[in-house]
């Protein structure tokens, strides 16, 4: 068996292993991140789909605003004062869909909480078929007098199979959405391996002459 075939088998074996997830609480845990802010929006009310660039499409619940400049987050303080961000409605869902799958993504988030409402944001990663890959509920608690405070929340996986990432929480707010470079589609890998095989074959022919 030649080296190209061995490489193809090794990569296929790695791809077949289960993807281990890491709940990310810092953007440094997202490999080579691209970051999308919402500075290009000015109070745009939308449920999507809204293309954000970089192969990312946004969807939200009723009352979602891109380029929001003020939000009361109850006992967690407030967001605003020169900061623009994405803000969910009362149901509070912000969902980011990737044109090509990625290994990891996350954002700086907070949410409205008071009294009996939970102090938590749920982050969920979805596969290509819409199945839940990972979901985590993360407490986000900031001072009632705070401004623009929150927590980076994301998911990083060893295998690039995240097709969408969502944040859910009452009145959830998010900024600086970051994601890893897209993972090539299976067809792209097949073409690459075929190309490697052709290169190897041509190399052998030249050696034999």
Image (cartoon, rainbow, N blue to C red):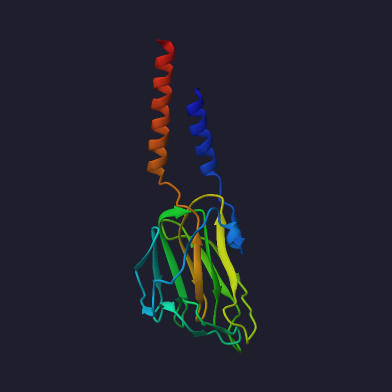
Locate the C terminus and report the quarter of the image it occupies.
Answer: top left
In the depicted structure, whether residue 202 falls above or below residue 18? above
Question: In the displayed image of the protein, which residue is found farthest to the top?
Answer: 209
Question: In the displayed image of the protein, which residue is found farthest to the front?
Answer: 82
Residue 198 in percent (x, y) is at 38, 26
Residue 150 in percent (x, y) is at 59, 75
Determine whether, in the image, residue 109 is placed left or right of residue 101: right
Residue for point 50% across, 84% down: 71
In the depicted structure, whether residue 20 falls above or below residue 44? above
Residue 133 in percent (x, y) is at 51, 59
Question: In the displayed image of the protein, which residue is found farthest to the bottom?
Answer: 115
How many numbered tags mark residues here? 0
Residue for point 56% across, 74% down: 121
Residue for point 41% across, 57% down: 129
Residue 142 in percent (x, y) is at 63, 80
In the depicted structure, whether residue 77 falls above or below residue 207? below
Which image quadrant is residue 115 in?
bottom right
Which image quadrant is residue 58 in?
bottom left
Of 207 and 39, which appears nearest the observer? 39
Of 179 and 124, which appears nearest the observer? 179
Which image quadrant is residue 10 in?
top right
């Amino acid at each position: 068996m030649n080296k190209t075939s061995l490489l193809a088998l090794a990569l296929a074996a790695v791809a077949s292993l289960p993807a281990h997830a890491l709940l990310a609480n810092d953007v440094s845990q997202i490999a080579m991140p691209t970051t999308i802010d919402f500075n290009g929006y000015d109070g745009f009310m939308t449920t999507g789909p809204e293309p954000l660039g970089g192969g990312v499409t946004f969807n939200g619940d009723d009352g979602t605003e891109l380029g929001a400049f003020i939000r009361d987050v109850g006992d967690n303080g407030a967001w605003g004062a020169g900061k623009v961000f994405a803000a969910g409605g009362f149901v509070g869902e912000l969902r980011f869909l990737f044109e090509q799958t990625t290994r990891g993504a996350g954002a700086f988030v907070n949410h409205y909480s008071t009294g009996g409402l939970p102090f938590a944001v749920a982050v969920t990663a979805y596969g290509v078929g819409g199945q839940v890959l990972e979901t985590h509920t993360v407490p986000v608690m900031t001072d009632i007098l705070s401004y623009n405070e929150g927590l980076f929340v994301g998911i990083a996986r060893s295998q690039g199979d995240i097709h969408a990432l969502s944040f859910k929480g009452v009145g959830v707010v998010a900024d600086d959405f970051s994601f890893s470079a897209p993972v090539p589609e299976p067809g792209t890998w097949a073409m690459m391996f075929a190309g490697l095989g052709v290169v190897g074959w041509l190399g052998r022919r030249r050696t034999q002459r």
